[in-house]
Amino acid sequence: MRYYYNCHLKAAYMQKYFAMEFSGIDFQKNISPIKWANKLMVADKIYIHPNSLYLLEPYYYDLVQISNNIYTEINSSLTMSEILKTKKKIKIIYRRNHSFMWPEYEE
């Protein structure tokens, strides 16, 4: 499964707030996300580098979407173990006081 963003602004946001890396793109520190977004505009799909896939795993205190209308905060080992046990595909929507832009994926 390959994860990607089809919106250059989402990719630049994730790079800024979560240090996400992307395949074939060398981000430099201290450059504004808008400048990076302009560089990313030429790509239809911006693929997440394998080194950054760990960011898509749930962490304690993430706000996650489990299904269409069910949201929960992972605030205990019980919640975490339930999520990992069920192997449900969750979407992280909020982490460390920042929105989390969930990527698209292709199999």
Image (spheres, grey):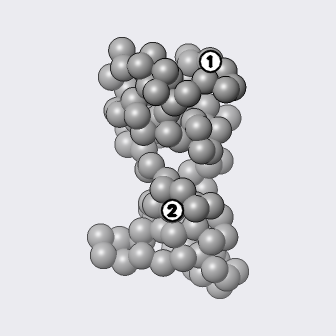
Q: Amino acid at mark 2?
A: Tyr
Q: Position of residue 82 (x, y in %)?
A: 58, 79
Q: Give the label on residue 94, or none.
A: 2
The span from disc 2 to disc 1 (Cα, nearest Å) is: 26 Å
Q: Position of residue 60 (x, y in %)?
A: 66, 70
In the picture of the structure, the residue carrying the numbered disc 1 is 26
Q: Residues within 10 Å of mark 2 (few under 14, many from 20)?
A: some
Quarter that holds the C terminus: top left
Q: Secondary structure at mark 1?
A: loop
Of 72 and 37, the residue lying toward us: 37
Residue 7 in the image: above or below residue 35: below
Left or right of 52, for residue 102? left
Q: Is residue 82 visible?
A: yes
Q: Residue drawn 42% across and 71% down?
A: 66
Q: Amino acid at mark 1?
A: Asp
Q: Is residue 43 visible?
A: no
Q: Residue drawn 49% across and 21% down?
A: 35
